[in-house]
Image (cartoon, grey):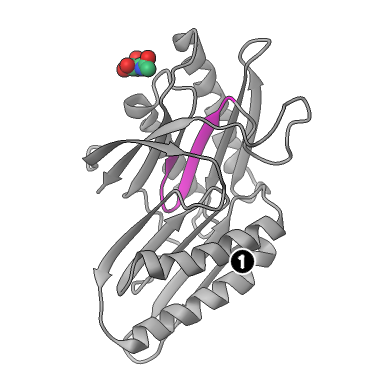
């Protein structure tokens, strides 16, 4: 936490109307050289093909001194069809968003895609973060935050439990009319302990950005945590109206 420097706080209202827009992306390390782009293209098509099936894949391309490493993961609760669509969008958008950059990452609601010319696979990364927090506060906010804290503890415990595939989902009633939905997930390349640390670090940001907020999420490259008062994960809660209920969010970016 102490290492994170708060770079900028964009007071942007993001209309979260559609799940096919990216939430954000990160680019670093300019390169020139056609063979790097060719390796990136190879990694991307490999990742889309492999991860569309099981929801997760890693890949690498290259020879001689240089290579590109890639990782793709869908949120653990989405269908393989939604996963595939998301990854195709991501693989198209990422090289366009980060032209001639060797370290590129893109976050969507349903998936995450990343490549780098260094082998990052298996190494937990909780440096760069995208944080989205609802512009509105909850009613009875202190009690609400307490309930959110409990929900996130449960979701995190699930995410590191054997057999969970790194995904934790929780649903808990705050009042007769308000349900809190929480989700925690790590990328599948990192070990359980690293996952627990990543999630714990992600939730620590709640104290700075999410206090009283109706909904909030912290997106790292190796894990993410999120809560809302509308159902945003599958299977859709039968008692609720729809998954498309959305609000407006402020965005904050943390850079190491
Ligand atoms: C929401 O609560 C936070 C934390 O108490 C406060 O800083 C912020 O001004 C509140 N926002 C609104 C819209 O009430």
Please provide the residue range marked out in magenta: 218-229
Q: Please give left or right for residue 25 compared with residue 4 in the image.
A: right
Name the residue nearer the viewer: 125 or 40.
Answer: 40
- Residue positioned 50% across, 63% down in the render: 90
Q: Is residue 65 above or below residue 54?
A: below
**Splitting the image into 4 quarters, where does residue 133 fall?**
top left
Tell which quarter ligand 1 is in: top left
The picture places residue 172, in percent across and down from the top left corner, at 65, 22
Name the residue nearer the viewer: 100 or 46.
Answer: 100
Q: Is residue 50 above or below residue 215?
A: below
Q: Is mark 1 within 8 Å of ligand 1?
A: no
Query: Which residue ends up furthest to the bottom in the rendered image?
Result: 64
Q: Can you identify the residue that label 1 sits on?
A: 51
- Residue positioned 44% across, 22% down in the render: 213
Main secondary structure found in the magenta portion: strand
Name the residue nearer the viewer: 235 or 13.
Answer: 13
Query: Which residue ends up furthest to the top in the rendered image?
Result: 140
């Amino acid at each position: 936490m102490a290492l994170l420097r708060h770079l900028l706080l964009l007071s942007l209202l993001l209309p979260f109307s559609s799940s096919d827009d990216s939430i954000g992306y990160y680019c670093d390390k300019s390169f020139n050289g056609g063979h790097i782009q060719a390796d990136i293209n190879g990694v991307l098509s490999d990742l889309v093909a492999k991860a569309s099936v099981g929801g997760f894949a890693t890949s690498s391309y290259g020879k001689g001194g240089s290579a590109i490493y890639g990782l793709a993961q869908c949120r653990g609760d989405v269908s393989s069809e939604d996963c595939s669509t998301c990854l195709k969008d991501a693989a198209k958008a990422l090289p366009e968003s980060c032209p001639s950059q060797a370290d590129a990452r893109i976050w969507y609601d349903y998936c995450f895609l990343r490549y780098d010319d260094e082998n990052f696979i298996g190494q937990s990364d909780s440096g760069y973060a995208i944080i989205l927090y609802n512009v509105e506060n909850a009613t009875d906010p202190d009690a609400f935050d307490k309930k959110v804290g409990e929900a996130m503890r449960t979701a995190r415990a699930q995410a590191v439990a054997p057999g969970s595939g790194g995904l934790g989902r929780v649903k808990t009633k705050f009042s007769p009319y308000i349900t809190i939905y929480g989700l925690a997930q790590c990328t599948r390349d990192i070990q359980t302990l690293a996952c627990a640390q990543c999630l714990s670090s992600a939730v620590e940001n709640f104290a700075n950005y999410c206090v009283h907020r109706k909904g909030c999420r912290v997106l790292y490259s190796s894990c993410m945590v999120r809560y809302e008062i509308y159902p945003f994960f599958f299977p859709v809660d039968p008692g609720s109206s729809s998954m498309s209920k959305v609000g407006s969010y402020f965005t904050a970016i943390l850079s190491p």
